[in-house]
Image (cartoon, rainbow, N blue to C red):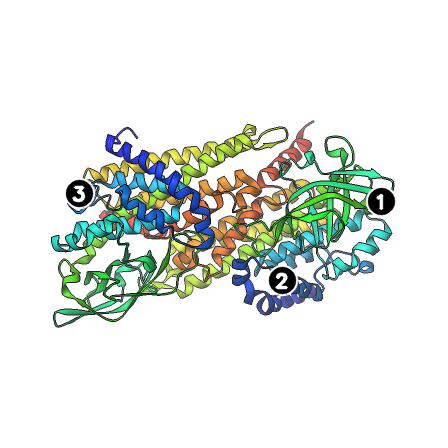
């Protein structure tokens, strides 16, 4: 790590301990999201890390972003993911936007004052995102959106929604991307989803009922929406890997600390070889995943991380996090199963990493497709 | 199973109907609210299963380990939390009293426990003595003809609802000098601590049993003083086989839900069950569930035939809950985003099942038991 990265880690550790940790258990139970925590991350300069300075970003790389997300995720995967998704949307807006769009939409997001959300999935099109049904009809003075989006992270608390909607015929080439601001007539939210984990991060359905937006809210060209969404997700898969990694590191720390402190049969649990092997496997899995995140984020910063590597990063890191958190509950035994200790929450939070931003089954489809491209003569 | 008796087949049918009507519709609500389905529990008394292994002369069903496992599986499909409470009552309290208590004690306690008028629990684990249960520190000190109890029992299923607690306590300095007492809520023998918030099994109340200078008459002691370790261990065997029955129910339910969802959910223009990726997961889940079922009922059957050993109970307890967690995690994965939502049952089944890798002896303790049994004979 360079000096700046070390400083970031130190700052986040302090922020985690003072601002996030005290509310973790209560907010998980009550399903509460605290905007002031997100804004606090913004005040530390973390809300627009890879964005250029002219729109208020920190002008750093994805490598730095991944270090930040990993660190936040050691305390709270939900806040790390809120930041990960918001940053993903900002990056894609920055890349495809007009100058007016950049100046209009990005500063409030890079400062952390506001949050961005990504609206692709629908109730009947999850993995098969290209079949989405939400429509955007072109009219004289803009577009009229109709349809529903499902599983939208930060819906209701976000102010900027990047929405994929159909402007043309069937298939991926008929999809365009739009920026919709909270408060637009016809933009509505469903009730908060009740979930196994990530309970601090609100997930809602988003409805568009004759929701009219101006022409200049189209991002890129008509028909580019799906390509742009996939590009966003490719980068998002690296950052999701980093979030899963941080969560797993916390689980290992909890497991080792407990094993050293808890005595049974007149010795510390840690002294039992069976436990040592479990902990060693957890550490080995974590370190392998850390290398994937590091490599993928460096490649991204160097000009582009291929799909095979990005998907591998997401697949391995999230499967690892599920395994490591499950084992951490096991190491803590009965107390690990209670909400007095964080590991059961870590385990619940880990599961959805295998589902979001492309299920791990979809990652395998992507990897296989890349293999075919690579080896088919 | 081919060796189920007619009576066991009838029990399976009754329990399946009961679970569909009285348990499944309320499982999500009780999980969310961390509340106990007392109404269903009381109705189990009418169904005649609260004393599944107890003698008919006390109102029991007079059946065995296979029968108890059948109930666990059928109820476990619908609500593992309530099933765990049923297990704590029927296997940990009732079965222990049936096997170890005097005729007078059985006459006094069993009829009300079996009718559902009373709820039972058992107290073994303590905050500092979980896996190392025999090291327990709750004291029963002799005081004339009576005993004075002091200590705290932890992780007690049904604690807050229990009228009767079957409790182990130390009556001497030697490690194995443990005695058993049947304690009554009505006589203020115990108080209960705050409810414990858990990842799963939230519909099963878990709490502490607290004894502070409690006077308990000698008539509450079960068997001889200082002789409890052997029957404590013996009851753990049937506890472990039957708790694995809950995990079998979890796996079967997860498989059933996944098959249904994979047939209905369409992506890329066809049911997701048409994709080999999903087929692989479903096939693995079905294979594991089938292996769990055959292993478990075989072990339960052997138990009923009198072939009882800790190693087979530990094998069931190590293998089946672990596999059920794998099956349940895959079930969530098959359901995708919906699987993660509390609107669908699979995430609850997963959370509930994780406890079965910890309660009634952790996986790690099962490894110790199996290894000690297998390797012990090579000891010099």
The disc placed on residue B56 is 3
Spatial CA distance of label 1 from label 3 is: 80 Å
Report crowding for label 3: few under 14, some 14 to 19, many 20 or more residues within 10 A (C-alpha): few
The disc placed on residue A153 is none
**CA neighbours of label 2 inside 10 A, class few (<14), some (14 to 19), many (20+):** some
Does residue B320 show up? Answer: no
Q: How far apart are marks 3 and 2 (CA)?
A: 59 Å
Q: Nearer the viewer, mark 3 or mark 2?
A: 3
The quadrant in which residue B52 appears is top left
Secondary structure of residue under mark 1: helix
Give the spatial CA distance, label 1 vs label 2. Answer: 33 Å
> Is disc 2 placed on a helix, strand or loop?
loop
Q: How far from the left and from the top, in percent, is residue A148? A: 67, 41
Q: From the viewer's perspective, is the residue at label 1 or at label 3 nearer?
A: 3
Q: In this view, does A20 lie to the left or right of A234?
A: left
Q: What element carries label 3?
A: helix
Do discs 1 and 2 belong to a common subunit? yes
Residue at 67% across / 66% down in the picture? Answer: A40
When asked about the image quadrant of residue A271, the answer is bottom left
Asked whether, in this view, residue B62 is left or right of residue A43, the answer is: left
Residue A308 picture location, percent across and down? 65, 40
Q: Mark 1 points at which residue?
A: A215
Instruction: Point out the tag, 1 or 2, that comes first from the N-terminus.
Output: 2
Q: Which of the chains bears the disc numbered 3?
A: B
Q: Name the residue under label 2.
A: A34
Q: Give the residue at x 27% y 64%.
A: B136
Label 1: how many residues lie within 10 Å, few (<14), some (14-19) or many (20+)? Answer: some
Badge 1 sits on which subunit? A
């Amino acid at each position: 790590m360079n000096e700046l990265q070390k400083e970031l880690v130190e700052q986040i550790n302090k922020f985690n301990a003072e601002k996030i940790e005290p509310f973790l258990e209560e907010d998980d139970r009550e399903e509460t999201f605290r905007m002031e925590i997100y804004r606090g991350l913004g005040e530390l300069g973390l809300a627009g890390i890879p964005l250029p300075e002219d729109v208020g970003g920190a002008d750093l790389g994805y490598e730095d972003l991944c270090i930040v997300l990993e660190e936040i995720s050691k305390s709270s995967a939900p806040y790390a993911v809120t930041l990960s998704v918001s940053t993903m949307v900002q990056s894609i807006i920055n890349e495809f936007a007009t100058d007016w769009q950049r100046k209009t939409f990005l500063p409030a997001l890079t400062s952390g004052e506001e949050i961005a959300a990504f609206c692709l999935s629908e109730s009947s099109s999850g993995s098969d995102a290209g079949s989405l049904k939400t429509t955007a009809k072109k009219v004289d003075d803009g577009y009229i959106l109709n349809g529903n989006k499902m599983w939208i992270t930060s819906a209701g608390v976000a102010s900027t929604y990047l929405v994929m909607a159909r402007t043309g015929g069937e298939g991926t080439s008929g999809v365009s991307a739009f920026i919709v601001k909270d408060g637009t007539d016809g933009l509505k939210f469903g009730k908060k989803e009740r979930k196994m984990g990530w309970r601090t991060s609100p997930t809602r359905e988003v409805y568009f009922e004759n929701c009219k937006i101006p022409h200049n809210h189209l991002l890129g060209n008509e028909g580019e929406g799906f390509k742009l969404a996939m590009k966003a997700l490719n980068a998002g898969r690296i950052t999701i890997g980093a979030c899963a990694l941080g969560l797993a590191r916390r689980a290992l720390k909890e497991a080792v600390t407990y094993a050293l402190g808890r005595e049974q049969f007149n010795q510390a649990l840690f002294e039992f070889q069976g436990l040592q092997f479990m902990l060693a496997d957890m550490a080995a899995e974590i370190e392998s995943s850390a290398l994937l995140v590091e490599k993928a984020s460096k490649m991204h910063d160097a000009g582009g991380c291929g799909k095979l590597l990005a998907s591998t990063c997401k697949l391995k890191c999230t499967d690892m996090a599920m395994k490591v958190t499950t084992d951490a509950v096991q190491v803590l035994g009965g107390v690990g199963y209670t909400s007095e200790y964080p590991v059961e929450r870590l385990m619940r939070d880990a599961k959805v990493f295998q589902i979001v931003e492309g299920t791990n089954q979809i990652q395998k489809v992507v990897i296989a497709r890349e293999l075919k491209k690579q080896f088919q003569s | 199973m081919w060796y189920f008796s007619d009576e066991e087949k009838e029990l399976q049918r009754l329990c399946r109907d009961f679970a569909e009507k009285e348990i499944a519709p309320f499982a999500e609500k009780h999980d969310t609210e961390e509340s106990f389905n007392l109404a269903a529990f009381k109705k189990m008394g009418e169904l005649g299963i609260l004393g599944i292994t107890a003698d008919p002369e006390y109102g029991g069903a007079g059946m065995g380990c296979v029968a108890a496992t059948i109930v666990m599986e059928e109820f476990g499909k619908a609500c593992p939390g309530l099933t765990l409470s049923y297990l704590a009552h029927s296997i940990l309290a009732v079965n222990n009293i049936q096997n170890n208590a005097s005729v007078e004690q059985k006459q006094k306690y069993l009829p009300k426990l079996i009718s559902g008028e009373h709820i039972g629990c058992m107290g073994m684990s303590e905050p500092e003595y979980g896996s190392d249960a025999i090291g327990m520190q709750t004291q029963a000190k002799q005081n004339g003809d009576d005993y004075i109890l002091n200590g705290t029992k932890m992780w007690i299923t049904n604690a807050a609802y229990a009228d009767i607690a079957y409790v182990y306590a130390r009556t001497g300095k030697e490690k194995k000098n443990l005695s058993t007492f049947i304690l009554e809520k009505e006589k203020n023998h115990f108080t209960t601590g705050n409810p414990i918030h858990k990842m799963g099994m939230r519909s099963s109340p878990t709490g502490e049993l607290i004894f502070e200078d409690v006077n308990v008459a000698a008539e509450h002691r079960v068997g001889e003083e200082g002789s409890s370790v052997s029957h404590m261990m013996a009851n753990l065997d049937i506890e472990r086989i039957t708790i694995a029955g809950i995990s079998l129910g979890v796996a079967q339910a997860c498989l059933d839900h996944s098959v249904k969802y994979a047939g209905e959910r369409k992506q890329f223009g066809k049911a997701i069950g048409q994709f080999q990726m999903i087929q692989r997961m479903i096939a693995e889940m079905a294979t594991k569930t089938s292996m769990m079922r055959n292993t478990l009922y075989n072990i339960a059957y052997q138990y009923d035939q009198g072939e009882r050993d800790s190693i087979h109970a530990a094998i069931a307890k190590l293998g089946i809950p672990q596999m059920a967690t794998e099956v349940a995690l895959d079930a969530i994965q098959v359901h995708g985003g919906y699987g993660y939502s509390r609107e669908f049952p699979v995430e609850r089944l997963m959370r509930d099942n994780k406890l079965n890798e910890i309660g009634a002896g952790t996986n790690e303790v099962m490894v110790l038991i199996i290894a000690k049994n297998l390797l012990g004979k090579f000891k010099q």
